[in-house]
Amino acid sequence: MPMLPCLERTSKQFASWTLESSRVDARVQVADILGGVGREIARLAEAGTFDDDLQRVTSEMLDFNGMWSEGSPLDVLYERRPPQYIQAYLDTLS
């Protein structure tokens, strides 16, 4: 299977891959926390929960360019609570 052009370009830029301990680099700790929050939001949506406190607090962080399939739990979550920044941005364009 041929590699997608965007991945082919990107893969040539990587010289190496290094695993870091979160005890050594605080950025890894932040990435771990954000990854865990995203995973929990998706898990709740998959379970049919769309009004959890965590989802309400983080709804502004959902990107309107998100890559999820139509009708998926994340799509439903986004449709129920679309981020307000999108409307503010669209208002500046008109």
Image (cartoon, rainbow, N blue to C red):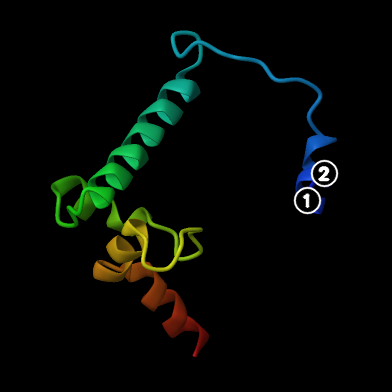
Q: Which mark identifies residue 72? A: none
Q: Which quadrant of the figure contains the N terminus? A: top right
Residue 1 appears left or right of 61 = right
Residue at the (35%, 38%) spot, across then down: 39
Q: Secondary structure at mark 1?
A: loop
Q: Is residue 27 above or below residue 54?
A: above
Expressed as whole percent of the image width and height from the top left, the position of residue 82 reads 31, 69
Q: Is residue 58 above or below residue 81?
A: above
Q: Residue furthest front?
A: 1
Point 76% across, 20% down: residue: 16
How crowded is the residue under tag 1: few (<14 C-alpha within 10 Å), some, or many (20+)? few
x, y percent for residue 81: 25, 66
Q: Nearer the viewer, residue 92 or 43?
A: 43
Q: Which mark is residue 8?
A: 2
Q: Check disc 2 and report its element: helix, strand or loop.
A: helix
Identify the residue shown where x is 45% and y is 75%: 89
Q: Image quarter for residue 62?
A: bottom left
Is 14 placed left or right of 52 in the picture? right
Give me the C-alpha separation between circle 2 and circle 1.
6 Å
Residue at position x 77%, y 51% in the image: 6
> Against 85, is 29 above or below?
above
Specify few, some or many for label 2: CA neighbours under 10 Å numbering under 14, 14-19, or 20 or more. few
Whether 28 is drawn above or below 84: the answer is above
In front here: 84 or 18? 18
Q: In front: 31, or 40?
A: 40
- Compare residues 9 and 45 and report the one nearer the observer: 45
Q: Residue furthest bottom?
A: 94
Residue 9 is situated, as x and y percent measured from the top left of the image, at: 83, 45
Specify the amino acid type for callout 1. Leu
Please give the residue where the numbered disc 1 appears in the rendered image: 4
Residue type (three-letter) at the residue carrying disc 2: Glu
Q: Position of residue 25 (x, y in %)?
A: 50, 15
